[in-house]
Amino acid sequence: MTKLTGKVYLVGAGLGNVAYLTVKAYQLVKQAEVLVYDALVDQSIIPLISPHCLKVYVGKRGSQVSTPQSEINGLLVKYCQQGKLVVRLKGGDPFIFGRASAEIQALIAAKCEFEVVPGISSALAAPLLAGIPVTDTVMSRCFAVMTAHEPEALNWASLSELETLVILMAARNLPVIVHQLRQHGRSPETPIAIIKNGGRFNQKVIVGTLNDIVDKTSRESLSPSVIVVGNVVQLQTYLQPRHNHSRIMLSPLLNHTILVTRSSEQSNEFRSLLEQKGAEVLEMPTLMIRPPSTWEPLDQAIAFSDTSKPFDWLLLTSANAVSFFFERLLANGKDTRILASTKIAVVGKKTAMVLRQWGLNPDFIPPDFIADSLVENFPESVSGKRLLFPRVETGGREILVKELTQAGAEVVEVPAYESACPDTIDPNVQSALENGIISIATFTSSKTVKNFCKLLEGFAGDSWRDLVTGVAIASIGPQTSQTCQTLLGRVDIEAQEYTLEGLTQAIIDKM
């Protein structure tokens, strides 16, 4: 019997945000069969993960209940011995105040293959993203990085003589840090900065001196944060980006936090469009795309297509329908040749683009990019024609089927995929909604609106509408807008062109 050979990669996730992953980390996360990840890993990384990947959360947060290190070690060994590609995703760099050594010792003892992939440490990146360099030719010729998790173990007499200190895991011990530095000779006027959630949408920087920083932060929750002590803190106002007119023109969505409610598998393109215009983007997937409850109806339709009497038209109204239909075609041992005498109608530019990736061009795209205009603009009479319509299993386009049937067509509907509502909301998104951080919530289908409301009601109860009182509601088109009006009571922005690009432009025009 061939012995399974797995491998564990201990990967630094940087600041957590996908933008600060190294290229190798990015590739490994996409390839992972098992992902064992920490609390500081940002939700923006989740779309990279394969839907077939097993995700295991082992986060450690302050005084909260944490996964024992021995249990984490055991998980890594277990999945490696099963022959899996395991990614242990750790905040920052695996060896900067992490527990990588303990995990490696366990892997060595179990004779498991492993590799360490460096990450960008928050000790370096968080200060810079807050406009604070840790070295300067005049103000700081050296710096020290430390953890203040156990401040009594540090040599404060020596540390106090250094020009710049960068302190991690220090939020709970800020009064102790200030006391030790002042006791060992640092001036009470020494600048200090607290950088909370460095590099993320909710980054906050509090600047003060050793004399007043404790009072300034007495009512603040500071975890997770990086503390910088030294004169380089004074450079923050000089190095922060100036929001001048030219910058605003280049980044019209600067200072806006936009919520994307598409499925995690489909959010990357929209996120990229918004970020290119300067927006901070949060993802709250309201759809989980998965196979239908049974493949039998679609398989029967595919088998019929490969006969002497194929379907006259194939209707594809979403990118998901294209992907699932053609993947199932291949799974049945067929290929696109069985569609040689079948015309294809698609709804939307994105659907057409995905179809072309399969080597096929659509024969018809309705001018308004919406399914409702498909019937009135259809290029030929559908009377007596047989149309195959692979669609979402639940909540599909009943009006389209009704109108085609009334026009004399025989429409064969088959479930090609299902879109379900997730069970939970990412804690970062929940916090952003509760604290009024989100400027705009975007919706690209009626189902995203329905599931959004369902998820909000799940954690906020009858008061869920209060969470979107100050949030602009942005819709991709008329059908989605109608659902927004019904469930949310308003639509503030509607795309003129019913595409992601059109929705992005509509948001820019409104802001």
Image: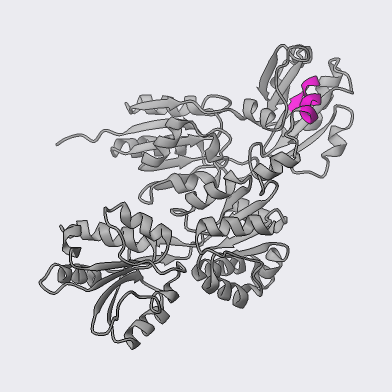
Relative height, residue 167 to residue 59 (above, below):
above
Number of marks in the image? 0
Q: Main secondary structure of the magenta part?
A: helix
Viewer-proximal residue, 117 or 480?
Answer: 480
Q: Position of residue 349 (x, y in %)?
A: 42, 59
Left or right? Give the position of 391 relative to 508.
left
Task: Write down the region rendered in magenta.
Answer: 228-238
Q: Residue at x 55, y 56 (%)?
A: 284
| Quadrant in the picture for the N terminus | top left
Relative height, residue 68 to residue 155 (above, below):
below
Q: Position of residue 262 (x, y in %)?
A: 50, 59
Q: Residue at x 57, y 76 (%)?
A: 482
Q: Residue at x 45, y 27 (%)?
A: 117
Viewer-proximal residue, 109 or 173?
Answer: 173
| Quadrant in the picture for the C terminus | bottom right
Q: Is residue 91 visible?
A: yes
Q: Position of residue 247 (x, y in %)?
A: 70, 40
Q: Position of residue 442 (x, y in %)?
A: 58, 61
Viewer-proximal residue, 480 or 4?
Answer: 480
Left or right? Give the position of 383 relative to 229.
left
Inspect the magenta stretch and tell me whether residue 223 lies in it.
Answer: no
Left or right? Give the position of 231 relative to 466.
right
Q: Quadrant of residue 369?
A: bottom left
Q: Residue furthest front?
A: 379
Q: Quadrant of residue 218?
A: top right
Q: Quadrant of residue 362?
A: bottom left
Q: Is residue 295 visible?
A: no
| Color style of the picture | one colour
Q: Residue at x 88, y 19 (%)?
A: 187
Inspect the magenta stretch and tell me whether residue 230 lies in it.
Answer: yes
